[in-house]
Image: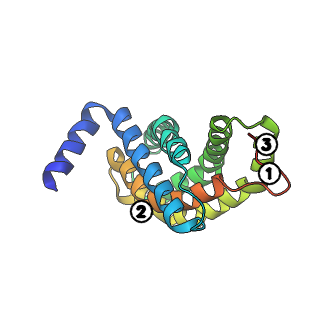
Amino acid sequence: MAGLWARYNALLEAQPLLTKALTSLTGFTAGDILAQSFIEPGDKPYDVMRTIRLGSFGFLLHGTTGHYFYGMLDSKLPGTAPLTVATKVAIDQTIWNPIFGLMFFGYLNVMEGKSFDTYVNKIKADLKTAVMGSWAVWVPAHTINFAFVPPSQRLLYINTIQIGYNVFLSFLGNKEVDGYEKEL
């Protein structure tokens, strides 16, 4: 295990963006597999394309934007003083969290070939739930993150927690909006 940890850290040092993107790919893929295996009704067939969409979101958007956002946050607000940690958590949850939700629902909408109107209706129906639902997980998680986790390890820590949170996101992201039929 120590060897694997050393290899991960070496890759993180050599190629931080790629490493974080691959870490997010893993987290989002695992979260969707868990959601489809244990949350979705048993008679619903496994949707491989859904897992690919979620994993590719992790790779293309979550890992990359997280790398830059958390890097910027750490550069503008260095340190682990309680006020600094609280400020980082507040920025993450009031600014980044809604932006993340817009990206998440938008990416799924585009990858599923749905209309802009469907995206707007999804945002109206589920963005508030996603943002407020995340507070229960991410306020305490990011308090620990910003206070104790080294900046280079933040996305790994986030993705470890994200696996469980992605079960919720996967379910919410693939839930049909009431009153709108599924588009082909």
Q: Which mark is residue 118?
A: 3
* Image coords of residue 142 (percent x, y): 47, 58
Task: Work out which quarter of the rendered image holds the C terminus and state it.
Answer: top right
CB within 8 Å, label 2 to label 1: no
Residue placed furthest toward the right: 179
Q: Helix or strand or loop: what does disc 2 sit on? A: helix
Amino acid type of disc 2?
Ile
- Circle nearer the N terminus (2, 1): 1
Q: Residue at x 65, y 53 (%)?
A: 174
* Image coords of residue 21 (percent x, y): 41, 38
Would you say residue 78 is visible in this rendering?
no
Q: Which residue is mark 2?
A: 144
- Circle nearer the N terminus (3, 1): 3
* Image coords of residue 110 (percent x, y): 67, 35
Amino acid type of disc 3?
Thr
Q: Which residue is mark 1?
A: 124
Q: Residue at x 47, y 45 (%)?
A: 77
> Horizontally, is 135 left or right of 17 in the view?
right
50 lies above or below 110: below
